[in-house]
Image (cartoon, grey):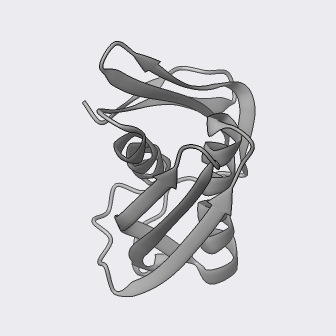
Amino acid sequence: MRFRFFSHTADLKFRAYGENLNETFANALYATMSSLTKAKIRPAKKFKVKVAGRNFESLLYNFLEEILFLIDSQNFFVSEIRNLKIDEKNFQLSAELYGDDGENYEIFSTVKAVTYNEMFVKKFKDRWVAQVVLDI
């Protein structure tokens, strides 16, 4: 399972899963994108992102906010993430994002913001879990 949605009043809550932090953060990105469209986005353009945080939660928050910034400022919808690297000691992330112009696809929702409400990034046994609430 890559991610799972939960009911949440006026917002959208999901948990992303992975065997490591990279996979978990990538799946959080895919969950965020699937909340906007069900279309298969072509990997026509590429953006590089770098973000930092003070812990895993702020790193995830900043990463997803960077995605929302690209959607709002460049109308860039992500289809694929490559070369995702997380520096776990310094809470830094870099990645290459591939996607396309959103006006080429049916978009059914808008995410206004990522929130810290109920957010966590934890390791349970052999699996990482990240919970995020999006303000829609």
- State the residue at coordinates (54%, 44%): 88
Q: Tell me if residue 110 can be seen.
A: no
**Of 59 and 136, the residue lying toward us:** 59
Q: Tell me if residue 55 can be seen.
A: yes
| Coordinates of residue 7 in the picture (x, y in percent) | 53, 20
Quarter of the image that includes the C terminus: top right
Give the residue at the far front of this rendering: 89
| Coordinates of residue 40 in the picture (x, y in percent) | 27, 65
- State the residue at coordinates (46%, 43%): 28
- State the residue at coordinates (56%, 53%): 109
Quarter of the image that includes the N terminus: top left
| Coordinates of residue 51 in the picture (x, y in percent) | 65, 62
Q: Position of 27 compared to 92: left or right?
A: left
Residue 119 found in image quarter? top right
- State the residue at coordinates (33%, 23%): 127
**Of 95 and 77, the residue lying toward us:** 95
Residue 10 found in image quarter? top right
Q: In the rendered view, would you say 50 is above or below 33?
A: below
